[in-house]
Amino acid sequence: MKQPYKIGSLKQWVLISFILVSLPLIFAISYTVMEVSDYSKKSQATLFKAVQETESTRIILERLASMERNIRQIQLFGKSVFFKLYQQNRHEFLNQMTSLSLLNIDMQLVKQLQVLKNNEGTLHLYILNKLTGDNSKLTQEDINSFDNLTKQAKVLLDDAEKRVSEKSASLSVSVQAFTKQLIYLAIFSVALTQLIALIFVRLLTRPINDIALAIRTLGDEGFERSISIRGPRDLKELGADLEWLRLKLGSLENEKKQFIRNVSHELKTPLATLKEGTDLLSENVVGELNTEQQEIIQLMKISNITINDLVGNLLEYQRSISTKITFNSSTFKLESLITRVTDEYELLLRSKNITLESNLESTQINADYEKLKIIISNVFSNALKYSPENGSIRLMLSSHKNIITLTIEDQGTGINKDIEQLMFTEFFRGNPSSDWKIKASGLGLALVRHYLEIHQGTIRLLPSSKKYCGARFSIHLPQK
């Protein structure tokens, strides 16, 4: 069923962010379109007016030239035909003067037009009086009077053309200023858009990063830190689900710890009793035992050792995950610790008739004695467990450039490539040894890696050799 649209969801946040990011660009585009349209209209009006002034002035100049030509023709041929042409040209001249006056022109041009019109009117009255009088002959002086009018009209034309050039130059300057303004607006809009986009990217990715951090914290640090996600509603709900999962996993973890603690402690008491009992029997406290009974006692001792190792690993694992590990450093000879560990497994070595080859260089180290004992004991017991009857185990200890290297090799079945990455994980058990009747806990190598990390050491699996075809572990520790 389709979920109802929730206010504050990630979908709505993305939609709002898209709208807000688009607003500066929409405003910039709209403003640019309106400004360009307005500027285009003003430019066209300005240029049209300037061109119209120039064209009208040119027509006025042409009419004056035609009127002057008509007057010269009247002087030569009389006024019969040419006076009518003169009247027509003068009528067009006056109409053009009137049209130009109606334009929204500056006062200087108005004054010049008025002077020209007055001069032309005076000259026209003079010509009419002379042509209607007894002496209708026009003199050269009368004709030359039109030259003054023509000169005035040429001045008007020159001024009009100058104004066209000035307005064109002004428009060019305005275009440059307007272009700069649009460039600044575009830069500002893009910068504002990027700023808004960065803000929303931060707002949207922060809860996602918080969720990723919460998941990593669950895997790395455990289940103590509560999870609270701020942001869109659906991401908040996901955070709430993670918090529920954290509480559930924390509860399961506590139950697991409690179970391990109870089982380990419950096993300790009967194991201690079993050890005491087998020791008393082997010492013939309750009577001398025959050879078969002694062999049974030896088997019981071996089983007791292996079970104690398993329970010890369980308890040690419980302590490592439930309490803060303390580092009790001291300086001691590492070869002595290794010898002590191998002596504890002497009975098991004899039971499988395994030869121990030791090449231990005298080496001092500053470390936690008990934790190193657990590291060596677990790796050595694995080698013993997987070694075949009548096999051999080799221990080599050396130091070079303040790095101590301990190599433990056996002749067992080795470790498959597909489980190399899993063998140091908790509760992982590899291929069981057919000679080992008690199953492993899967905690030995996990504790080894954990305690080596505390010592800033490492462990790695070496390739098998011709003689030692089983597992070959190399432990590296800093010689502090």
Image (cartoon, rainbow, N blue to C red):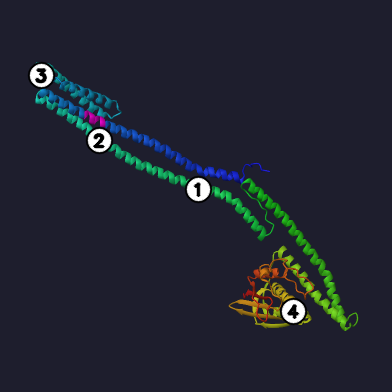
Residue that numbered label 3 is attached to: 136
Identify residue type, mark 3: Ser
Compared to 198, does 312 lie above or below? Answer: below
Lower position in the chain sequence, tag 4 or tag 2: 2
Q: Main secondary structure of the magenta part?
A: helix
Q: Nearer the viewer, mark 1 or mark 2?
A: 2
Which label was assigned to residue 195? Answer: 1
Asked if labels 1 and 3 touch by Cβ distance under 8 angstroms, the answer is no
- Work out whether residue 260 or residue 54 is closer to the camera in this orientation and state it: 54
Which residues are the magenta region? 55-61
Residue found 52% across the figure and 48% down from its top: 197
Compared to 273, does 217 lie above or below? Answer: above
Q: CA distance from mark 4 to mark 1?
A: 70 Å
Q: Nearer the viewer, mark 2 or mark 3?
A: 3
Residue that numbered label 2 is attached to: 161
Q: Is residue 336 left or right of residue 162?
A: right
Which quarter shows the C terminus?
bottom right
Identify residue type, mark 2: Glu
Identify residue type, mark 1: Leu
Q: Is residue 11 left or right of residue 107?
A: right
Can you give x and y, in whole percent of width and height, for residue 241 in the image?
69, 51
Lower position in the chain sequence, tag 1 or tag 2: 2
Compared to 354, does 208 lie above or below? Answer: above
Lower position in the chain sequence, tag 3 or tag 1: 3
